[in-house]
Amino acid sequence: MLALIGEALLAYVVIVAVQILINDGLFGLAKVFVQRIRDLPGVDLLIGAVIKREADSFLRQIDSKRSPTVEMSIKIPEKGISHDDLREEMKQLKGEEVNLDDGQIFAYVYTAQNEHYKAMEDAYLAFTDTTGTGTEKGDTDHETLVREFLRAFMHENALNPIVFPALRRFETETAAMAADMLNGDANVVGSLTSGGTESILMAIKTYRDRARSLFPHIKSPEMVAPITIHPAFEKAAHYFDVKIVHVPLDSDFKPNLDKYRQAITSRTILLLASAPQYCHGIVDPIEEIGNIAREKGLPFHVDACFGGFMLPWVEKLGYTVPKFDFRVEAVTSISADIHKYGYGLKGASLILYRNSDIRKYQLFAYSEWPGGLFGSPGMTGSRPGGNIAASWAALRAIGQDGYLRMARRLMEATLALRDGIERIPGLAILGKPEMTAFAIASTDSHLDILALADAMEEKGWRMERQQFPNSLHCTILPHHVTLVDKLLNDLRESAENVRGKKAKGGTAAIYGMVGKIPDKAIVDTFIKQFLSDVYTCKT
Ligand SMILES: *Cc1c(COP(=O)(O)O)cnc(C)c1O
């Protein structure tokens, strides 16, 4: 206690001294003084507390509408909000925004003639696929609502959350609704990002910077992940210079826990797992890896980009879902995509942290730009407001009842499909997937699964090919519900047709060849050459 009072006094003296120095024009001296003082024990914490108080009061000064800090519990509404009520809310929120037509703003929006933007909006909306955003296939009312939100806010820019308070509200409430869905408490904070990849990039940057700050002796940081972790983590590893140590799978397509543990070294800064991994739709052993994380004192990110908006409802329906969310105490962050089973529009995902003490390493600030003080939470600078509004509207319009209804229908279709596929001679589902995705493999050496994929494409299906082992990935979506029998019949017919036949040409041959190249660097060069060709405009 005495020590605390002593430190508080010290901080007070420091702050007064700095103010005197600055007022006397001795800014340079004040800077050196502060740098010296910050090395004293406890001073950084106190400076942090003072800065927090100042930032709070700054926010209140520039944002008079900000409500006093009441702890609100914001959830996805139990029953979806009616479209008319949401339209009313939208009108009110839009009414409080700066009016772009008044011309009293100097940044963030680049206005042109209204007809021009009207044409842009029409083109954008024409190519924005809102089908499947409703709880029913072809729910045109819901699609219309989402489009209205998109159009109302598409010119607003979330780069400045003070100029556009509605966007800030949409973003913070969307994060809060998802945090509640994932059993987080009121301390969970997060950002809306442009997609799963940005969420993941931000998480890795956050933990890298956390390690730099807390464990500066680690020069070559590493993170541990099952081989099924999404390639976005490989990209993040590459961009941010954190090495991924890969853990192989057991026959149940889950990472081997002994090998997971062995992969941890004194350089490890982060553990990773997926709920579920995309390839086979299987949830990694989150609780078990959580135990390892707790034992080793390491942070633990769960990639629920795929399942974040599906597993909670599957669990509520009574299916067995291993605990994967903030209920697992060692989990420090979760990524979850709104533009997948959240049924939002392309370009919407969330990165959620257990508390702001972890999130602080994500935030970027630069105070020496001649253009003013700059701060930004994510990879992007300007951020289009339309999708932020649409995400918020989607969660509130669908509601818990809508997500549950949709999950029930998709799980029934998934189980019917899995059962039907297991009955087709020579085909099997890999492992025991927990939600609405699975991988089909061949159990018959005379049935080439890649040749089967080619045969299915001839029937109009677009198949997703996978390797190690070769298999076909299926994510089950609302549009599949009425196609279960057709899909099973086509699979059965195609399997009979290709059995005993060698794949001739087609993608099967290419994949077969690529699979035989031992040096994967050659394959990577091939992929980059392919990308280079694909992304060259040719007339
Ligand atoms: C889709 C997905 C991602 C990446 O998300 P994008 O939105 O495509 O960037 C990451 N992890 C998993 C498990 C995914 O399914």
Image: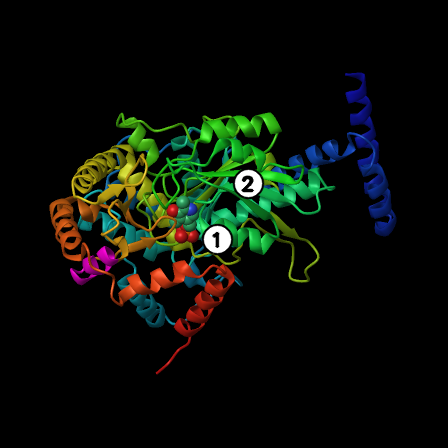
Task: Answer yes or no: is residue 133 visible.
Answer: yes
Question: Residue 61 colored magenta?
Answer: no
Residue 224 marker: 2
Label 1 amino acid?
Ala
Q: Is residue 532 above or below residue 179?
A: below
Q: Is residue 459 magenta?
A: yes
Q: Residue furthest top?
A: 1
- x%, y% of residue 376? 57, 51
Give me the residue at 46% from left, 27% from top.
287
- Which of the pair 106/230 is nearer the observer? 230
166 or 381, which lies in front? 381
Which residue appears at 29% of the width and 42% of the height?
437
Q: Nearer the viewer, residue 476 or 126?
A: 476
In the picture, measured across the screen, residue 124 lies left or right of residue 409, that is right
Mark 1 in CB contact with mark 2 (< 8 angstroms): no
Q: Residue at x 67, y 47 (%)?
A: 220
Along the polypeptide, which appears first: circle 1 or circle 2? 1
| Residue occupying image coordinates x 71% and y 57% | 368
Is 85 situated left or right of 39 in this image? left
* Badge 2: residue crowd in 10 Å (few <14, some 14–19, many ≥20): many
Residue 65 shows in this picture = no
Q: Quadrant of the N terminus?
A: top right
**Position of residue 511 measured from the top left corner of the image (x, y, whole percent):** 35, 61
Q: Which residue matches tag 1? A: 158
- How far separated are the C-alphas under marks 1 and 2? 34 Å
Of 192 and 265, nearer the camera is: 265
**Magenta region: which residues?**
451-460
Tell me the quarter of the picture where residue 152 sits: bottom left
Identify residue type, mark 2. Answer: Val
Of circles 1 and 2, the one toward us is 2
